[in-house]
Image (spheres, helix red, strand yellow):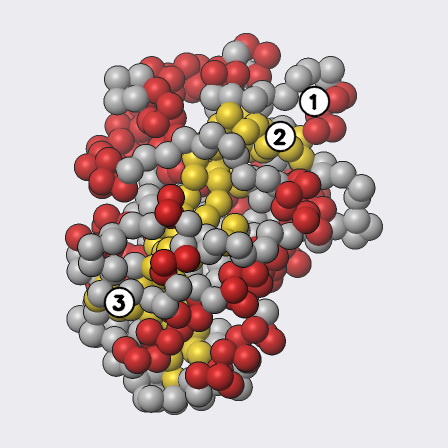
Amino acid sequence: MSITKKSTVKSVALAVGLGLVALPALSACGSSDTDSGDGGGGSKTVTLVSHDSWAVSKSVLAAFEKQSGYKVRVLEDGDAGQAVNKAILTKDNPQGDVFFGVDNTLLSRALDNGLFQSYEAKGSDLVLPEYRVDQDRHRVTSVDTGDICVNYDKAYFSKHKLAPPTSFDDLIKPEYKNLLVTENASASSPGLGFLLGTAAKYGDDGWQDYWKKLKANGVKVVDGWEQAYNEEFSGSAGGKKAKGDRPLVVSYASSPPAEVIYADPKPTTAPTGVATGTCFRQVEYAGLLSNAENAEGGKALLDFMLTRTFQDDMPLNMFVYPVREAAQVPPEFVKYGPQAKNPETLDPSKIADNRDDWVKSWTSLVLK
């Protein structure tokens, strides 16, 4: 769900949107001089399975390895939807010990399929109350949060003397016709989050009518975030190079800080902004995999993810917000990408009951 330092260095942008379809083979990236010969099953190695957006400072990870005695091996499995599906298919013989990257849009799929075993991580009592879930069984640990929102190209709207949109309602107005690009809700986490945001905003009886109007107003749908943000969107560094012509894109509230932090030369203000009335809040979780070979190492790694050291380090590596009380937020986030004050939210049980039907209906309505 998130921007990562390694991806922004290459593209000054967010990490690839989480997908829900293909199941590619795992690729190993590892922490440093990690011995992966034991496949993560030995007592000295703990294996983290993740989507491609996992990132942590080398010094922070090295400190954990020194303190705990474990070497961390990381297996990246594409985007989060792919990684979740693969983990479910291999749950009886898991590829690792801990899974990181399932979010509130897909949590029910993981829990209903028995992906995780119970473990209450140390520090769980310090997670902000609004991000706590599964409190009776503790199968997942909340790690980070972020907002999926429409971003806008400031230069475009200034040039055309047009006020940028601020809400879902604005996006269906004639003055914004043919300006928005979004991702396929059946194949991308930001796309799904945007769909869920409209379902939360307009309810079971209203979201389909909203999408009919959005389609009539020229919304463009592409496969995933990378294409939408780095090719179609005129406001991003990648989009400028690709001559993108859509000044509105579904992305993250943390996209503008990334555009500033990784630009060279660094601008004095973000070239992109956020339509704060279009935001849907994501929460991302980690859990101890059922049948993990190194459960003790996995528990230590989950404890580590809730320490101040990791939570303070996380924002500028994965471009997400911490969930622990009193964790530090970088000043660039406060200035260029503050969290939405009133984001749309949905209870995970509501998502679980309706997600598949919503996506099916959306696909029929928007893509056909």
Left/right of residue 56 with respect to residue 356 in the rendered view: right
The residue positioned 56% from the left and 61% from the top of the image is 312
- Which of the labelled discs sits on residue 364, or is there none? none
Pick the residue in front: 122 or 37.
Answer: 122
Q: Are marks 1 and 2 in contact (CB under 8 Å)?
A: yes
Which residue is tagged 3?
A: 119
Q: Are marks 3 and 1 in contact (CB under 8 Å)?
A: no
- Which of the labelled discs sits on residue 152, or is there none? 2
Pick the residue in front: 11 or 32.
Answer: 32
The amino acid type of the residue labelled 2 equals Tyr
The residue positioned 51% from the left and 32% from the top of the image is 341
The residue positioned 36% from the left and 68% from the top of the image is 122
- Which of the labelled discs sits on residue 157, or is there none? 1
Mark 1 crowdedness (10 Å alpha carbons): few <14, some 14-19, many ≥20: some
Secondary structure at numbered mark 2? strand
Secondary structure at numbered mark 3? loop
Tell me the CA gap for discs 1 and 2.
8 Å
